Amino acid sequence: MRSAYLESQKSQQGRKLMACLPIFYPKPVLTALNICAAEVWGPPGPPRSAEAGRIQTYVCPIVRNALAFLAGRSAELADGLLCPHTCDSIQGLASVLPDFGGWAKPVIHFIHPRGPRRASTLAYLNQEIRGFVKNLEAFAGQSLDPNRLRWALELHRQIDTLAAKLLARRAYLDVDDFTLYTTLRKGEYLWPEDFFEELKRMDARLSDTVVQKGLPLLLSGIVPEPMSLLKNLDDAGAYVAADDYAAIGRRILPHADPPPSDPFAALVETYFAAPPCSTRASSIDGRREHLSRLAAARGVKGVIFHPIKFCEPELFDIPLLKRRLAELNIPVLVLESGLESELSGQTVTRLEAFVEMASNHGSQA
Amino acid sequence: MISRRVQYELAGRVAAPFLTKLDQWQAARKTKHPKRPTSGLFGPPLESARALKALMTSYYLRGRYADGAVPVAWVTSGFPFEPLEQLGYFIIYPENHAALCGARKLVPKISAAAEQEGFSLDLCSYARTDLGNVLKQATPVGRLPKPDLLCCSTNICQTVLHWYRNLADYLKAPLVLVDTPFIYHASPEHHLQYVVDQLEEMIAVAEGIAGRKLDRQQLVEVLARSREGSMLWRECLATGRAHPSPWTGFDTFFHIAPIVTMRGTDKCNAYYRHLLDELRDRVAKGIGGIARERIRLLWDNLPIWFNVRELSALLAERGFNFVCATYSNAWAEAGCSIQLGEPIPSMAKAYLEVYLNRDLANRLETMKQLAREFDVQGAVLHSDRSCKPYSVGQIDVKERLASDLGIKALVLEADHCDQRLYSEEQGKTRLQAFMESFDG
């Protein structure tokens, strides 16, 4: 279905198609240049080709699966590859593919700054986005129209605002987590206007009263894979009341109102205003405060850290985040994802036990 | 403060020289009454090793008393440290400290504290060792001084950034970051300017903590010493081109310590002049690092610190010698390119363009150049579980070394510091099979 949709974007809409590695890149620029982004988060399950063997098994499965997918010719539809500088492993993949074979089409890099907002990072990001635009213009074969960029920024502002509303009012939304996340994740490949329509359809299902009766949990990680995890949680009597996935909640950007008149300044501002993320090297204190606020605002009764196996940025942050949640008397479960297709029976049992324990946690106190 | 300063000075000027003399006296006694005969696999040990031990003992001894006496910075190994040196900081390199713990096989014990705190075994063993030491003060060097400033540069990996963000939280110390955008083929102008801007920001923070302004004229002098040290190290490494090589690649892993921890100082340069003289003398006399050098190899990636002796003996038995290593060579690159006329921009360029901050095509070219210059017949690529940026791509590199240069290569899976992540018997079997392939 995804392939058919992307094919139609090219053949019927005349758009270029960009395969995008995770996580952060200034998507409104692609939209403004009529480039459809299709993100490559693995895909999950076993590697799609033997090319995965070119990277060691102790490296993040998103990267190994992406190599298998891209070098195994499963992304022939794409006209180019966008590589944000997310981590050491994606950095390596972005060199392995063009330098040693597996991807002969254009490769465009976006190297976002690390660490806090400061004079140097502001100036750098502004220049990096401008360089990114030049490379994309060459790729798209057209110049960027500033008015078109403003239009794209406004569209993405509306998308972010609506997605944030859906997550904030999760308890009032009469759908299960699997359905909600399936919709939210369509943003990984749908043309933004189509995605906005999907979100609006979801918005229509918001109720005036709380409909979610399960145990409210906060989930934090890179990407909610396997998606069956959400069904398992549902079966266990819990739901995702708060989201801190890099693929979802951490990419829902707060926008200034009114936005800066310079669209480049708007892109820079939204980057720094984004919720804290380990891969952008936000301070641990910032992450602690963010999770604490989310947990309090949504009445969270338990937190599941769901990192991808071997993901250093995430794994480094967990001990101090756990410590804060312990201070708040919130139970925590750490569940590593190997990007498998389904959770094992043993893991499902751990989930069920955690939900039961968290349900009883307050009453025993 | 004054008494602390006195302790610090006494540690460096009195205690360390005394301990060195004592050590030398004990070593001399052992030489007179050797407990066991030498194996005969290796050439005579390098005399400079004693000076190295003295230098490092003095460094860590002074470090014990540095906090409270002088400002202290903990710094990643690729950090542009020269302004800190001029501002009078005592600089600690946690990576070097972790390597020392690794060589003494102490990492599982020290890392346990970090693992109990929740740090995954899949994280870099240098980081786990350092965090374990911070949590439980378990170090073979007595103690490390508490930092006033943490300095991190991403030019060697992103791991250090996540590691140092944790240190900043545990130690309640400010963290300055010099973020170096990764270089795919070439670096655009604004990437260099970004590093320049961050260096100026870092200097302002370091000045505030040190309580004085950076003397930019004296910074040039530090940079000159730093560059000279790197050049001397490069010349030391270049002696390995001789047949036989006067030392082994494994020797270089240990003699690298001053260029990592004391670059920019007279002590460091004096040490490498001494070492260079000795190496050249060995070349002139035809003395090899191993007794019977037959096959020359290249080593890629960090050492397996806890297994260096065992590996060197295994190889030396069959006449195999590592005559060059990308890891040792990396320390000869950055400092050499510093231009004294433009200190900050040239520092920015030098530290931006380090080996590990460049794409795989560049790394392959460097390896091919080393292979040609050092006349190697084979390569061992240490696939290091703890170092993803160094290890990703090695499987393709192995193929390219074989196809482009016709040399045999082996990917050996291990870890730079944690022996729990290395199957010694399996590694030994793979190395033996690899060595046998040269005789086929």
Image: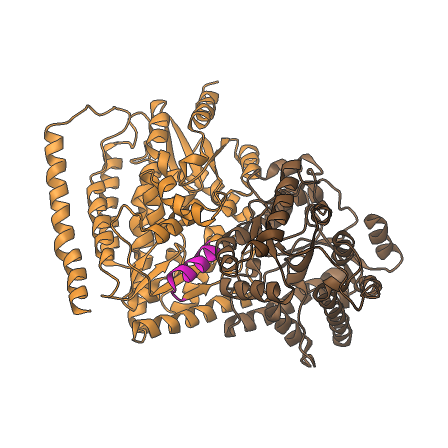
At horizontal 48% and vertical 66% (from top left) the residue drawn is B195
Q: Position of residue A210 (x, y in %)?
A: 75, 64
Q: How many dots with numbers?
A: 0
Q: Between residues A104 and B114, which one lies in front from this camera angle? A: B114
Report the side of A158 relative to B37 (left or right): right
Relative to B92, say whether B218 is above or below. Answer: below
Q: Which chain is orange?
A: B
Q: Between residues B416 and A282, which one lies in front from this camera angle? A: A282
Relative to A15, say whether B1 is above or below. Answer: below
Q: Which residue is the extreme one toward the top?
A: B440
Residue B171 on the magenta span: yes
Q: Position of residue B36 (x, y in %)?
A: 19, 24
Q: Can residue B332 be seen?
A: no
Residue B232 on the magenta span: no
Q: Which residues lie in the magenta part?
A: B160-174
At horizontal 13% and vertical 53% (from top left) the residue drawn is B15
User: Could you say which quadrant of the image residue A184 lies in?
Assistant: bottom right
Q: Position of residue A320 (x, y in %)?
A: 48, 57
At horizontal 73% and vertical 71% (from top left) the residue drawn is A157
Report the side of B277 relative to A307 (left or right): left
Q: Main secondary structure of the magenta part?
A: helix
Q: Between residues A332 and B25, which one lies in front from this camera angle? A: A332
The colour of chain A is brown
Relative to A256, say whether B360 is above or below. Answer: above
Q: Position of residue B350 (x, y in %)?
A: 43, 59
At horizontal 25% and vertical 32% (from top left) the residue drawn is B287
Q: Which residue is the extreme one toward the right?
A: A12
